[in-house]
Every structure is written in C-alpha cells, then in structure tokens.
Image (cartoon, rainbow, N blue to C red):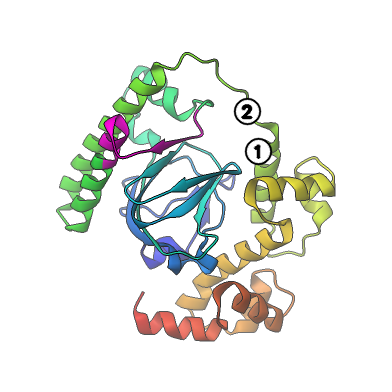
Amino acid sequence: MDRDAKYCSAFNMDFSETVAYNNPLFPVYVRHGILSTYPNYSAISHWHEDLEFILVKKGEMTYNVNGELIALSENTGIMVNSRQLHYGFSEEHNECEFLCILFLPELLQGNKWFYESCIEYIVRNSRYPYLVLGKDGWQGAILEKLESLYEDYAADKEEALCGFRAMENFLSVMEILYGRLHEDRRLPVKENGELSALRNMMAYMEEHFAQPIALSDIALAGACCKSRCSMLFRKYLRDTPVAYMTKMRLKKSLSPLLYSDACITDIAYEYGFCSGSYYCEMFRKYYGMPPLQYRKMQMESGE
C-alpha cells in the first residue's frame, strides 16, 4: 500500500471512505499489503461503495464484516460487498501478505438496464454482505482473475492497457458472481437496523473528530442510549466508542505528522486530543513508539 493510500483518508458526504485509487480518474485500487504495517496488526473499520476483494498470499488473518469474523488462510480470499462495515486484523499479531483490489461498481454504468438489472443485483444484494473465496471452482476462478490483474499493475504496464485489463477482469468477476447469486432463490434480507445506527454514529464521529465528543453525543447520533451505543461498537467493531475514536483521530493525524513539519502539540489539538502529552501517550500505545520517532522512521524508510 502506498503512503497516500495508507495514511491520507478522505470521506464522502455520508462519511463512507473515499478510496485513493491508483489513478484518481479511474476507480480501481490495486495494492499489495502487509498486515504488520498497520497499528497492532489491525486496520480500522470503514465502509465504501466499492466492492473489496482480498486475496491472502502468505500467512493468515481475520476479516470482520458487520461484526462477523471470517478466518482467511493462504491462497483464499473474500469479497466484501458495497457499503459493508469491514476491516482485517490478526489478534495474535501474525504476519500476513495480501492483495487488496477494489472496484467502484459505477465503472460498469454505461447502460442503465445492464447496470440496474445485473450490477446492482450484486452490489445491493442484502443476502450477501460478503463471500468467502476458496481455491477451487468458480471461487478459484475469481481469485485467478484478481491475481492476474495485480500482476499487470505490478509489472507497471502502460496505464491504458491496465485499464482495459481491469475492465475485462471486473466484468468477468461480476459475471461469475451474478451467475452464482442468481441461483440462490432465497428472499432478500431487510437492512440491519443496528448497522444503520452504527454507521450514523461513526459518521457523527468522523464529522466532529476535532471537537470534544461525549458518549451521549455519539449515542444521540444513533438514536439510542449510551449502553446500547457501547454494545453496538463492541458487537460489530470489537471496540469501545472511545477506543474507536482514538484510533480514528490517530490515523487522521498521520498526514500532518508525515507530510509537514507541524509540531506535536499543534497536531494534537487539531485532531481532537486534549494535549500533546496525551497524544504522544496514545500514539505510543497504538503505534509502538512516540510520534517523532515514527516520523523519523518513515522518512528513513522512504515509505
């Protein structure tokens, strides 16, 4: 994952994550990831319009999708559907190398009938917040196409050629998914009210991260009481609201920490921490070292 994609998060009006695509004008994201580069071997929970595909190359990790934990082993993967809460992690801090590929569904929006009948049938299918992808059969075929696409980008092929290959592979993957999902005649499931409330609370925290936020404020954004608010964060994110807010603020603070000469105290206040010393304390807790040491290490590594 490059520095811009890894450290500089942006958000849409609904506070879903804006993906830092390889080419900002072409909504495809293709990266090789290493889990140990994330604090405590864990990404932070987020959601976006894009379909996300993970292919584990070495090691293993756990993926949390809407609070459900899915174990991923070597040469297996997962498809996370549009707008689902998700993140990968390793509780035991085991290393994991993986490919991460995202496609924005609107990339295939050239024809209204086709998009509404075939593409939205997949991305708005509430029966499938995710699909585990094994090594064999149609699942293995999807993983092969994803790996082939990564190899095109890794080989630094001409940009237009990568674009053609991305469209070809994305369309093939969607055709496979449509065929498999269309065979399932189960009735669709209603939107989970708990997830809607949680998204609203997370959106509120994103919008007000620089301000002091009380648990009661977060709960109000989800139209629930404080105890239910805490329960929802534990159930779906395996975190407390306060811990999630701290991780989010720290992640946002990486941009000025790495790309400017701003002092620690200024960064701390700008990103919602009550003091420079508290910011340093939390940074050391989650990143394993003080912020200035982290800045120096990243500059020396050239990442």
Q: Residue at x 61, y 83 (%)?
A: 264
Using the image, tell me which numbered label, if any, was put on residue 158.
none
Q: Which residues are magenta?
A: 128-143
Residue 134 belongs to the span the image colors magenta: yes
Residue 153 as seen in the image, left or right of residue 267: left
Contact, CB < 8 Å: mark 1 with mark 2? yes
Toward the viewer: 39 or 299? 39
Q: Is residue 162 above or below residue 33?
A: above
Tell me the crowding category of disc 2: few under 14, some 14 to 19, or many 20 or more residues within 10 angstroms, Cα based: few
Q: Residue at x 25, y 47 (%)?
A: 147
Find numbered disc 1 in the image and state the secondary structure of the residue it sits on.
helix
Q: Position of residue 215 (x, y in %)?
A: 80, 56
Q: Position of residue 92 (x, y in %)?
A: 53, 63
Amino acid under disc 1: Leu
Q: Residue at x 25, y 51 (%)?
A: 150
Residue 129 as seen in the image, left or right of residue 235: left
Q: Is residue 45 above or below residue 182?
A: below
Q: Is there any visible trace of residue 255 in the rendered image?
A: yes
Q: Quadrant of the N terminus?
A: bottom left
Q: Residue at x 19, y 40 (%)?
A: 164
Find numbered disc 2 in the image and state the secondary structure of the residue it sits on.
loop
* Number of numbered discs on residues: 2
Residue 138 belongs to the span the image colors magenta: yes
Q: Position of residue 97 (x, y in %)?
A: 35, 60
Residue 122 as seen in the image, left or right of residue 204: left
**In this figure, which residue is indicated by the disc labeled 2?**
191
Q: Quadrant of the C terminus?
A: bottom left
Q: Is residue 66 above or below residue 18?
A: above
Using the image, tell me which numbered label, if any, was put on residue 195.
1
